Amino acid sequence: MRGYKKAVMEKYRNFPFISMVLVTANVMVYLLCALSGNRLYHAGDLSVYGVVAQREYGRLITSMFLHGDFGHIFNNMLILFFMGAMIEKEIGHIRYILFYFLSGIGANCLSLLVKIFNHDSAPSIGASGAVFGLDGVLLSLVLFSKHTIPRATPARVGFMIFYSLYSGLTGQNIDNAAHIGGLLVGFLAGTVMCIAGRRKRNQR
């Protein structure tokens, strides 16, 4: 009986249901946007006027679930599911979802600061800030965690991040500030987690 319970708990711990929920939620919102026109975009996008002037702070979160077209959501959700599932297995469901939203909110905060500095009124949407946060978490894991992640090495993760940032910097209509903000927040959060875990093991 104990062996059965242990097997069930292990299966539950390794199953990436948070990643699946996030992907499903993003796809459902995208379909709703397709049916409702621009209504949801106007109500939930990230803009200086909406967040700062109207104090609609919920836009820091709602904008993470809005995507402009099929290619936009497909790329984000593809990375979110496969990379997210790997990270969720390593750090657990609770920390995974906390780091995801923390990275997304941090990404949007830096995006707003850059918009204010540049007098940019253009709105932003997308989950890429949070996804870049997962990149940062993964980088901290391969650098500072004692666990080895299959096929994830510092060189490979570093190249993936460099290529993603380069693609954004050379593209058009890309919120690069959000990408950088999410990456930094995710890396810092992951580093703190690894250091805290190492200290806890040393105390034991």
Image: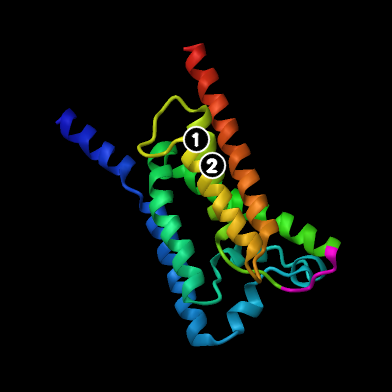
The answer to whether any part of residue 150 appears in the image is: yes
In this view of the protein, which residue sits in the foreground, 98 or 125? 125
The answer to whether residue 135 is left or right of residue 54 is left
Percent across and percent down for residue 79 are: 44, 56
Which numbered tag is attached to residue 158?
Answer: 2
Which numbered tag is attached to residue 132?
Answer: none
Residue drawn at 18 percent across, 28 percent down: 2
Query: Which residues fall within the magenta stretch?
Result: 118-122
The residue beneath circle 1 is 154
Q: How is the image coloured?
A: rainbow
Secondary structure beneath label 2? helix
Q: Which is the main secondary structure of the residues drawn in magenta?
A: loop
Quadrant occupied by the N terminus: top left
Residue drawn at 26 percent across, 41 percent down: 11
Q: Is residue 197 above or below residue 137?
A: above
Q: Amino acid at mark 1?
A: Pro
Q: Determine the residue located farthest toward the left in the rendered image.
A: 1
Q: Is residue 61 above or below residue 88?
A: below
Secondary structure beneath label 1? helix
**How much space separates mark 1 and mark 2, taking CA atoms?**
6 Å
Q: Amino acid at mark 2?
A: Gly
Percent across and percent down for residue 61 are: 61, 61
Check disc 2: other Cα within 10 Å, few if <14, some if 14-19, many if 20+.
some
The answer to whether any part of residue 58 appears in the image is: no
Marks 1 and 2: CB-CB under 8 Å? yes
Q: Quadrant of residue 190?
A: top right
Q: Is residue 10 above or below residue 82?
A: above
